Image (cartoon, rainbow, N blue to C red):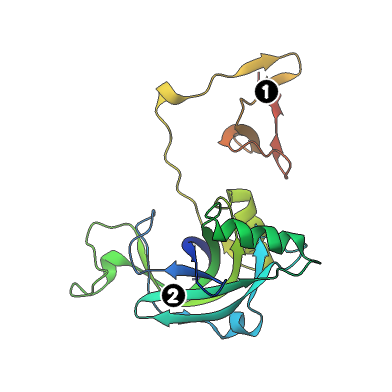
Amino acid sequence: MKQVFRTMICKAEASDDGTITAVASTPDPDRMDDVVAPSWKLDDFRRSPVIMHNHNYEGAVVGKAVEIDLVGDTLMMRVKFDEHESNPLGQRLANQYREGFMSAFSVGFAPGKVTPRSQLPKDHPAYSEKSAGSYMTENSLLEVSAVSIPANPHALAVRAKRWGLEPEAVKMPLPPASMAPSVKREMEGVRAPDGFHWMDYKGGPVLMRGGDADHEGASAVSSLK
């Protein structure tokens, strides 16, 4: 099975020494009912433990993980932001984490071994007969970013490409019909409502959540008849 680039959001809080402590992973089922085992490969990340902002690889490094390790079943790291006057973004982020305006990091990793939870031994802690999720081990930590909100599917695809991996398949439930947004028709076509954009697929345009239409295949207005 080809490795897949996945992400998880970890909670963060300020420490007394000015650093930020983040809980990167716990072996609990996630939103897709997958379990990320406390089986981490950290050597590659430790060689260059940089912290980026919103996964912007062309931007400035805003900090570094001065410590990262597995504590029991939890991957924990201690982040120090670059607060030198030459890095105003690092200064701003440090203040926002300390004051509680930001409280999450996004962790990108590649599971080395993926086993359906329904195929695990029945006495395994992660076994679930009816689960459609997977049990992931030998997880390679690739990158960490300070984020205000989780990455959207396009950002996930960009990050996966950087590592030569396939992006994680995101399972998004459809909203009930009563919540479907109204669509405004205009002379040039159909404009997506606020907070949505069109994606051009082979089967036709699809209305997607997110107002960012500045990427391949996306548009604010569709020629839908």
The residue labelled by disc 1 is 191
Instruction: Tell me which amino acid carries mark 2.
Output: Leu
Mark 1 against mark 2, which lies toward the viewer? 2
Quarter holding the C terminus is top right
> What residue is shown at x 70% (from left), y 62% (from top)?
91
> What residue is shown at x 63% (from left), y 50% (from top)?
154
Question: Is residue 216 or residue 76 the one in the foreground?
Answer: 76
Q: From what the image shows, is residue 217 above or below residue 21?
A: above
Mark sitting earlier along the chain (1/2)? 2
Question: Is residue 66 or residue 162 the one in the foreground?
Answer: 66
Question: Residue 153's x, y, as percent?
Answer: 58, 49
Binning the other alpha carbons within 10 Å of mark 2 as few (below 14), some (14 to 19) or many (20 upward) gives some
Question: Is residue 214 or residue 90 the one in the foreground?
Answer: 90
- Left/right placement of residue 170 relative to residue 201 reads left
Question: Is residue 154 or residue 206 the one in the foreground?
Answer: 154
CA distance separating discs 1 and 2 = 44 Å
Toward the left, the furthest residue is 123
The mark total stands at: 2
Q: From what the image shows, is residue 193 above or below residue 130?
A: above
Residue 3 showing in the rendered view: no
Toward the front, the furthest residue is 16
Binning the other alpha carbons within 10 Å of mark 1 as few (below 14), some (14 to 19) or many (20 upward) gives many
Residue 73 showing in the rendered view: yes
> What residue is shown at x 27% (from left), y 72% (from top)?
120
Q: From what the image shows, is residue 78 above or below residue 179?
A: below
